[in-house]
Amino acid sequence: MSSAPKENAQPKVTLHWLETSRSHRILWFLEEMGIPYELKTYKRTKESLAPPELKEIHPLGKSPVVELLTPGSTTPIVLAESAAIVEYFCDYYGQWLVPRRYQAGKDGQIGGETESWLRYRMLMHYAEGSFMPFMVLSVIVNRIRNSPVWFFIKPITAAVASTVETGFLSRNFKTHYEFLEGQLATSPDGGKFLCGKDLTGADIMMSFPLEAGQSRTGFSKEQYPKVWDYVERLHEREAYKRAVARIIELEGQFKTTM
């Protein structure tokens, strides 16, 4: 198991935070672990895109992106991709956010992993690999529906958007929400989080797509009560509240979705 860096070797951590983006879960993550950080915030363009300044930090021009400047170094390490950032910091600071990997007496054995750890490993990648693409597509569909086109074309764009929603998005969202409702219902040890009784990095990864889903999927708390209660439970964590308060202090407001 990795140990935390020595006190005199603490890096300077800078989070580049973009409004209504995945970067907020990284801010929450840093608050959850108590890691000192510097925060730089950015506004979206009028096209709702990330501003060009972010390309000066990372070639993809995206957020979240984290810079780590270690003592004695003049060139920062630049980390992109939410799951990679979470896993990197967990290796040094946040082992408590990773479930115990092996069952007793089965260290290093294939198939000897705990259910909590197997869920954690899958959900860390499920959030972006399986679930989030449908949220992104729903944003695109909504923009097609509301695009400024000639009035005689409007019925065509509306019909295209509706066809994609009813024929593709709705049934896929239903599949994922039923899956997540089941995961919460069968959480190991009767836990209230996806991997058991304790918060993990996977819960932090799942926060953004589920926040987006509350306004974009058409589903309600009555249909998926465990999912809705779970999101509310995440929002009640003190570290999450601190992250929101930090943004309100700097930006004047905080929104989870566009």
Image (cartoon, rainbow, N blue to C red):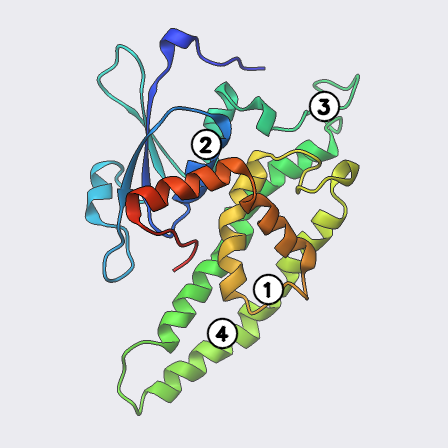
Name which of mark 4 and mark 1 comes first in the sequence: 4
The residue to which callout 1 is attached is 172
Amino acid type at image mark 4:
Val
Name which of mark 3 and mark 2 comes first in the sequence: 2
Amino acid type at image mark 3:
Tyr
Of circles 3 and 2, which is in front?
Answer: 2
Residue 31 has which mark? 2
Whether tag 4 and tag 1 are in contact, CB under 8 A, the answer is no
Inter-mark Cα distance, 3 to 1: 33 Å
Whether tag 3 and tag 2 are in contact, CB under 8 A, the answer is no
Inter-mark Cα distance, 4 to 1: 11 Å
Of circles 2 and 1, which is in front?
Answer: 2
Q: Position of residue 83 (x, y in %)?
A: 48, 37
**Which residue is at a point 47% across and 34% down the rendered structure image?**
29
Decide: is 34 above or below 173.
above
Q: Position of residue 9 (x, y in %)?
A: 37, 10
Name which of mark 2 and mark 4 comes first in the sequence: 2
Name which of mark 4 and mark 3 comes first in the sequence: 3
Inter-mark Cα distance, 2 to 4: 39 Å
Q: How many marks?
A: 4
Local packing at callout 1 (Cα closer than 10 Å; few below 14, some 14-19, many 20+) is some
The residue to which callout 3 is attached is 102
Residue 17: image quadrant is top left
Whether tag 2 and tag 4 are in contact, CB under 8 A, the answer is no
Amino acid type at image mark 2:
Glu
Local packing at callout 4 (Cα closer than 10 Å; few below 14, some 14-19, many 20+) is some
Name which of mark 3 and mark 1 comes first in the sequence: 3
Residue 164 has which mark? 4
Numbered disc 2: secondary structure: helix
